Each structure stands twice: as structure tokens, then as C-alpha cells.
Amino acid sequence: MLTALAIRDVVLIEALDLDFGAGLDVLTGETGAGKSILLDALGLALGARGETALVRHGAAQAVVTATFDPPIGAVAALLDENGVEVEPGEPLLIRRIVKADGGSRGFVNDQPAGAALLRDLAPLLVEIHGQHDDRGMLNPRGHRALLDAFGRVDAGDTARAWAALRDGNAALAAARAEIETAARDREWLEHTVAELAALAAEPGEEEALADKRRSMQRAEKIADDLAAIDDYLEGSDGGLARLRQAARVLERIAEDHPALADALAAVDRAVIEGAVAEEQLRVARGALAFDPRALEDDEARLFELRAMARKHRVQPDDLARLTTEMRERLHRLDAGEGGIALLEQAVATARADYDAATDQLTARRTAAAARLDEAVAAELAPLKLDAARFRTVVAAAGDEGWSAAGKDRVEFEIATNPGAPFAPLTKIASGGELSRFILAMKVALVQQGGAATMIFDEIDRGVGGAVASAIGERLARLAEQTQLLVVTHSPQVAARGAQHLLIAKSSDGTVTRTGVRRLDEAERREEIARMLSGATVTDEARAQAERLLEAA
């Protein structure tokens, strides 16, 4: 609900702060007083084009701030989707600034917001109906939802059937595409499967082979080093042979020279230790021995795995998985026709379920349309539209129009004169008729919900007496369900208002300004009397105004 509107420097309005309540708010004033400026200002806040002509002469910018109840439901969801944060329970403030030198800016709760977001918010917050309005109820795209809400038509079964049909068609299309692609590649697929199967790669095999290869390469290097050590120790010129020769010579001469006994003992120990080292080296060489052909085989396998992985642009460890996938693709190709047949059967079943659900949905809509036509027809005669006819068309939308909401296209049509053909409202209704048709439909659809605030701009133009009274009564009835703001020239409508705002111009001789003030009971009676009698307010007009207020 719109709770407040603050306007600064818009056309003839210098500064204006308005508070609005629930129910029916009426706005009156003499012709040319500037009632349209209020609607233009609200439209600006809700994303209308920011024309520089709206900026008051001499001002740097125009600013409009509209305050609404804390956002819930679709409004809250739209704000969240666009990253606009609003604290729970905090009012929704929409502010729009238009500069005199061009350009505009929008804000939602002081967070920058583009005009596109404001325009998306607008239909969720306010419905504006005027003589030239072509939105809201007059947009055929929303008629089906309005009819469903009126008739309490539940499309849940249809939505579920549509989801099953949509998913089935998607699965069938994907299977056909896969088979078609696979059929073109059958020769390559068979060759690839045979090639991968022959390789028989296993997960982790590449790492194991690489580790084994590194180990054998290290062993080969160590074996070369041990062979060099063996040359140092063994052989006729080796260190151990020379130690043995030295021991024999020392043993021979130590018999004559006892002082060499210790030297001989040391050399003997060296010979013994050398023999131990020689044996340990022999054992080590045996442990490190490997078949060079094994290294070659491992390297060949490793290079083969890596080459195959490069060929298929995967990691070597993924070759086993790739083999399985390729086999499955080949299997699906071989068994494809049987699978397609099953999917086609599933789609046929889903189509039958969807057809059954939509047939029932269409029947419920058709019944609801008859009730809606009757309800709207009951509202036409009192609104001086007794020659007009209204109908709700429920027609097949065509295959391209099928959806979770069914197969129906729904549109509201009227015929304004007996024998005249039916056509959309905007095609054949005049300005005054159009506003009254909208009111008739809104009263009939009052339970279906919609924006929390509705505005009717001069819905009573060109009518008076009993018709104006009927319009006022229906507006009051509608205001029991939603907030209504009505710009009116009719005293019968004005008398129905829960709050009455007077729009008037004033001038100091150089500057003309538009102002708005809330009327108390006495002022309200005087304003309604003026609306009844014109420039000169008579006692009779005041008495008639009093009777209208008492009747309301």
C-alpha cells in the first residue's frame, strides 16, 4: 500500500508531502488545478521516462519519493533477485531524481536502482487506470491468470504433466542426437574401443611404472659405480691383491725382524677387512642386478600409456574410465533403437497425461469464464453500459503456446453496441467507456488480488446522477479489498471517500504553484457543494452535499 508521497520541484509543485490511508482516497479540484501532476510524479517514481520538462522552472532538479508498506511476496522476491537489501519490517522507499540539465537517478531504500527495476516493481505496487491506460487488465498476457484467480482454477496437475512431457521430450531428443552422432562415428568408435581394450590401462599404472623406471635407472647407476670399486679392489693391480702381496713379503722378512710383527698384523687385518668388503660388494651387486630388457619393457609401456592419453586428451589414469565410457557409447549405439522406442513410449504416455490434464483445465476455465461474464454483465447496466456485452474468450493457443499453464489463450472482449462484433477493449471502447469497463471487471475480480494500490483517473468523466452514484458505490466496494486513489469530478464519487484531498493552484502574481491539502468534514462538505453548483456555492448545494455524505 502507498503510505506517503513526497514531491519536490515537479512542474508547478514546489514542495508537497502527502500521507495516504487504507480504503478510498478521493482527489478533487477545478479543471487545470494540476491533478495530473500528482499522477505524473508517482509515475516518475515508478520508472516512467524522466523528462526534463517535469523539473519546476528555476529548480536544479525534481525529486519524488514514494513510500510503501514493507515489501512481501513478489515485491520482496524481485528486490532480493536484484540485490536490493530491505530490513524486515522496514518500509519500501522509492526515490527518483531528474536533473534540469538531463539525466535521472533512481534509488530503492537509498540503494541505487535503475529505471528498469522501478518499472518491474511498478505493476506489483500500483495499478493506474485512466482513459488512455493500456496496461494491467488490458494486457491480454495477464488475462489467463486473472481468469484462473477468479475461478480458483488450479493448474497444478497440468504443470506436473507438462514437466513430465518436457523432460521426456528432452530425453528423447538427447538420445536421438547421441545415436545420430554415434552412428556417424561408429567406425572410429569401434577402432577406439579395440585400441583402448588392447592397451588395458589400469588406474595408477602410469605412476607405478614411472616409479619402477626411476628405481631401475638409479640401480643401473649404482651398479656402474660398484663395478668401478670392484676394479679398485680386485685384479692383478687391485688394492686387495697388492695388500696380499705386501702381507706375504712382510711375513717372510718378519722372521728375521720381530719389530715388523705389528706391521704384519695390521696388514693381515686390512686383508681380512678388504675380503669382507669384497664379499659385501658382491652381494650388493647381486641385489642390484636387473634385466635391462625389463627396463626397456617398462619404458615402452609407460610411453605407450602416455601417448594414448595425449591422443585422447585425458590423463593416463583416466584411460580405464575412458575405455568404459567408449564401450558404453558403443553399447548404446547397438541397443539404441530399443532405447528410442522406450523413450518414445514414455513421451506418448506423458503427452496423453498432459492432454487429459489440459482438457480438464480448459473445461474448468470455460466454466469460470461463463461465471465471470455473468458477473461483469451485472455491473455494466448500472454503469450506463447496458447496451454493451462482455465475454471471456478461451481458445486453443496452438502448439507453440503450450506451457505448464495449459493450452489455452484467454482474452477479454467487448461489443459496445447491439449487433456490433466483439473486439479487445482497447480497440473499440471510448475513454469514458474504457474506464467504466475496467471498473466493472475490477469489481467482478475483486477477490483475485493484484497490486495493493489502485488509481483511477477521472473514471467518471462524462457521467452523472445515478451512473456516478453507481460508480461511487462500486469504488467503495472495491476499496474494501485494496487501497484506491481516485481523481474525480463527480460529487457522488467524492462523497464516498474515506479521505478527501483538494488540489488547487495559487499565484502571487509572478509564480503559480499547485498545492494539495486534506479536507476536514466542513471543508469537505463545501468542496462537494462546489462540485454540485459550480463557482457560486448555494445553501441548496450544501444541503445536497450533506445528503450525499450521509448516504455514503
Image (tube, grey):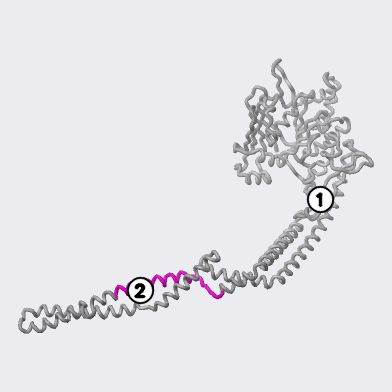
Q: Nearer the viewer, residue 26 or 9?
A: 9
- Label 2 residue SS: helix
Q: Find out whether residue 211 is within the magenta segment.
A: yes
- Categorize mark 1 by other alpha carbons within 10 Å: few (<14), some (14-19), many (20+): some
Residue 531 position within the rendered picture, expressed as x and y whole percent measured from the top left = 82, 25
**Mark 1 residue type:** Arg
Q: Earlier in the sequence, mark 1 or mark 2?
A: 2
Of circles 1 and 2, the one toward us is: 2
By secondary structure, the bulk of the magenta-drawn segment is best described as helix
Residue 308 position within the rendered picture, expressed as x and y whole percent measured from the top left = 53, 69
Residue 503 position within the rendered picture, expressed as x and y whole percent measured from the top left = 74, 25
Range shown magenta: 197-226
96 above or below 349? above
Q: Nearer the viewer, residue 163 or 29?
A: 163
Residue 428 position within the rendered picture, expressed as x and y whole percent measured from the top left = 86, 38
**Mark 2 residue type:** Glu
Spatial CA distance of label 1 from label 2 is 84 Å
- Label 1 residue SS: strand
- Categorize mark 2 by other alpha carbons within 10 Å: few (<14), some (14-19), many (20+): some
Residue farthest to the right?
A: 419
- Picture quadrant where residue 421 is located: top right
Quarter that holds the C terminus: top right
Q: Find out whether residue 45 is within the magenta segment.
A: no
Mark 2 lies on residue: 220
Quarter that holds the N terminus: top right
61 above or below 77? above
Mark 1 lies on residue: 409
